[in-house]
Image (cartoon, helix red, strand yellow):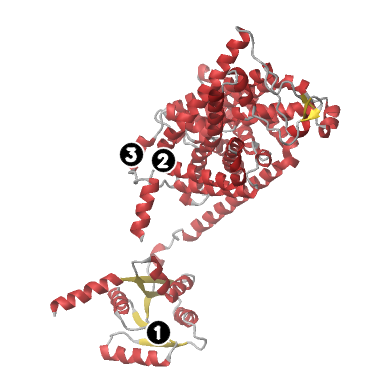
Amino acid sequence: MPDLVSALKRLVVGRPVRTERLGGTLLPKRLALPLFSSDALSSVAYAPDEILLTLALAGVAATALSPAVGLAVVVVMVVVVLSYRQTVRAYPSGGGGYEVVTTNLGPRAGRGVGSALLVDYVLTVAVSISSGVQYLASAVPWLQPYRVPLAVALIALLALLNLRGVRESGRAIAVPFYLFMASVGGLAVVGAVRELVGAGLPDAATASLTVVPDPAHDQAIATLGGAFLVLRAFTSGCAALTGVEAVANGVPNFRRPRSENAATTLLLLGGISSAMLMSIIWLATAIDVRVVERPAEQLLRDGVPVGPTYHQDPAIVQIANSVLGGWTPLVALVAVVAGAILLLAANTAFNGFPVLASVLARDGLLPRRLHTRGDRLTYSNGILALAAAAAVLVVALQADVTRLIQLYIVGVFVSFTLAQTGMVRHWRGVLRTEQDPGLRGAARRSRAINVVGAVLTGLVLVVVLVTKFTRGAWITVLLIALVFLLMGAVRRHYDDVARRVAVPADTEARSLPARVHAIVLVSTLNQPTARALAYARATRPSTLEAVTVLLDEASTVELRRRWDEVRVPVPLTVLDAPFRDVTEPVLEHVRAVRRASPREIVVVYLPEYVVRRAWYRLLHNGSAKRLHDRLRLVPGVVVATVPFQLSSADEIGDQEVHRG
């Protein structure tokens, strides 16, 4: 059975990779860009829609502000990218914002950033997969009832892809990533040529529809003069910034020089994302695209609501229909590629989460098994943990993008704000010690960028919390707080364990026990028992006894007779069991030995059957396992299992027949 499991694992995950080949799994920029930027670029498929539908709450005239809102998002993008380019150079270990904040603002603040980023990565997977599945279900309606299991299956597929190695997942994602870039870039170029040089672009199919302002927002718009709605649209568009921190967290996956390659990837990410975002918003404005939150109620055709049967295409599909003249094959290609990139956007989290979890585990804030690489040199435990958490969230919220999106971007802007505040303090420390005028000038410029970034992202965070808290952001805040407390508990546990197991100063006085009392548990006299007795005698304990529990009078009498007949040179102690339980009499006997000699170590030997077939294990070792688990909790007691492979009994029998 173990061989079958191992073969299946090799088939699914691949052959193990030797540690010295780690350099061969590192990524060139052409693979790192799709691997770490798919989340940020996929936002182009939905961030413009979020801006447009939020502004449309005030009516179609308000959507004219979308280019200004998009430009504000691009400004924040530029500042964040410039800041993180400095971060990857100053802190190349892969901790990203966590390492910056921990070093400059203290461990508690670092733990807060780590909590926020972990939650944000889980949400990235849940939102991206659910959005992609929704997109797919709109194209293939019969999939609609199966959105949740399909989303969970896709999460499992991405996890499997990443378990095989970051290089393989990078290759798999590169094709749809670059196709998406080419399709959006092609739309922008063709649209610009037709609009600026040719006869102009035809209006979108929805341009003739009338947008009805949402009455639920009339009071807020009237009170705040529309500023509140514009800020909400801005925060929705800031979803385009999610994924930027993944590059900083994934620096160890880059080829050398890691910091420079990561900085270049960040520059490419920021430039491409900004250009694509503004292109889509400009084209949507040029052809009068209509995208609203509740199309059945907010869109009118000839003064009549379009009704629930109306299907609202995303902005990018409406643009493709207009720019490409409704040529179905190319429009379908754009739609399919956009859906694919939404699904693959989750892969950014599958590369960022495990690296960050490894750094947190190294610092004792998460279980240490998350720090080690698996067979394929990936942080496999982190990948599995992310997949499980995202699947739970998808099932809990039924893959509902509208509900999930309200939980989004809180964590990433907590990280942005604290990380850039930490970088401000970093540059302050550099300026205190640096004497070179050129380097001091560079540090001042970097500090100014980080100050602007900290203020901007801090304001965005405040607006996000104000506008989205009651819509679901409170769940994200609660999750971040729970992860923060959990990491604190893990750290306290590890600190307590380290204190308890530390070698005391008087090591020599405590290095050896006064005596060793060995106990071999016996149920019947057979080869496993004989092997356990032989092993115990070979260790030369101070005293040695065999112990059996009286459960059946006839069996115990037969055991004594056989014991004397074979002349086993170990005394046999029979324990009474008035309630027919093996565990308690043995525990009480061991405790009595300990009470009689507190400085004496008790070693209990348990014979164990080792069988080949998994289901055979149900037939053996039940009492021994329970005893093993209970004895481990008794201070001053060492439990040793003595395995006996049943195949070895066959070999002994064959040898006896051969000698005969």
Residue at 63 percent of width and 39 percent of height: 411
Q: Is residue 624 left or right of residue 344?
A: left
Q: Secondary structure at mark 2?
A: loop
Residue type beneath disc 3? Arg
Q: Identify the mark at residue 165; answer none if there is no mark.
A: 2
- Disc 2 vs disc 3: which is toward the camera? 2
Residue 358, visible in the rendered structure: no
Residue bearing the label numbered 1: 548
Q: Secondary structure at mark 3?
A: helix
213 w.r.t. 145: above or below? above
Query: Is the residue marked by circle 2 packed among few (<14), some (14-19), or many (20+) residues within 10 Å?
Result: many
Residue at 40 percent of width and 30 percent of height: 255
Residue type beneath disc 2? Gly
Percent x, y of residue 353: 52, 41
Q: Identify the mark at residue 21; answer none if there is no mark.
A: 3
Question: Residue farthest to the left?
Answer: 659
Q: Quadrant of the N terminus?
A: bottom left
Judge by depth and name the residue closer to the eye, 423 or 415: 415
Q: CA distance from mark 2 to mark 3?
A: 12 Å
Residue type beneath disc 1? Thr
Query: Is the residue marked by circle 1 packed among few (<14), some (14-19), or many (20+) residues within 10 Å?
Result: many
Judge by depth and name the residue closer to the eye, 386 or 215: 215
Percent x, y of residue 118: 57, 43
Percent x, y of residue 176: 48, 30
Name which of mark 2 and mark 3 comes first in the sequence. Answer: 3
Q: CA distance from mark 1 to mark 2?
A: 52 Å
Residue at 56 percent of width and 44 percent of height: 151
17 w.r.t. 189: above or below? below
524 w.r.t. 141: above or below? below
Query: Is the residue marked by circle 3 packed among few (<14), some (14-19), or many (20+) residues within 10 Å?
Result: few
